[in-house]
C-alpha cells in the first residue's frame, strides 16, 4: 500500500505526465523524420540505452529498435499504404 500511495502523489503524477509528453514529442519527431515533408532516407537516435534507427527506400520504412539487453525489434511499414 505504501508503494501505491507513493506512486499516487501529486509530484509522482506530474512526473509521469512530463515523461509521457517527452516520449510523445520524441516519437512525433521520429515519425516526422520518417514520413514528413523533409523526411530523410535514414536516421538513428539513442535514448536511455535504446537505439532506434530507420532506413527508408522507395517502398518501405524499416524501423529497428535495439534495447539495452541487445534484443531487437524490426518493424516494416509500407510507405504507400500508411494512411488511416
Image: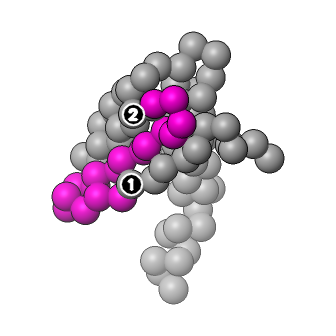
Residue 69 occupies quadrant: bottom left
Q: Choose between 26 and 36: the one closer to the eye.
A: 36
Q: What color scheme is it?
A: one colour
Residue underneath mark 2 = 55
Q: Is residue 62 visible?
A: yes
Q: In front: 53, or 57?
A: 57
Q: On screen, 15 above or below 34? A: below
Q: Position of residue 40 (x, y in %)?
A: 46, 19
Query: Residue 62 versus residue 12: which sits nearer the camera?
Result: 62
Residue stretch rendered in magenta on the structure: 57-73
Outermost residue, top direction? 38
Establish if 54 lies above or below 11. above
**Mark 2 element type:** strand
Q: Tell me residue 25's x, y (percent).
A: 57, 34
* Residue found at x 28% / y 52%: 66
Q: Residue furthest right?
A: 84
Q: Which residue is mark 1?
A: 74
Asked whether the residues under the numbered discs 1 and 2 touch, taking CB atoms below 8 Å apart as contact, a structural biologist would say no
Expressed as whole percent of the image width and height from the top left, the position of residue 58 reads: 51, 29
Up-down: is 62 above or below 35?
Answer: below
Q: Is residue 48 visible?
A: no
Distance Cα–Cα, label 1 vs label 2 = 11 Å
Point 40% across, 36% down: residue? 54
- Locate residue 12, reporting x and y percent: 54, 57
Amino acid at each position: 500500500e505504501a508503494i501505491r500511495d507513493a506512486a499516487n502523489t501529486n509530484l509522482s503524477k506530474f512526473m509521469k505526465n512530463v515523461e509521457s509528453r517527452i516520449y510523445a514529442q520524441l516519437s512525433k519527431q521520429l515519425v516526422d523524420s520518417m514520413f514528413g515533408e523533409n523526411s530523410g532516407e535514414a536516421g538513428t537516435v539513442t535514448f536511455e540505452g535504446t537505439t532506434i534507427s530507420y532506413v527508408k527506400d522507395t517502398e518501405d520504412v524499416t524501423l529497428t529498435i535495439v534495447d539495452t539487453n541487445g534484443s531487437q525489434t524490426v518493424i516494416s511499414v509500407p510507405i504507400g499504404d500508411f494512411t488511416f
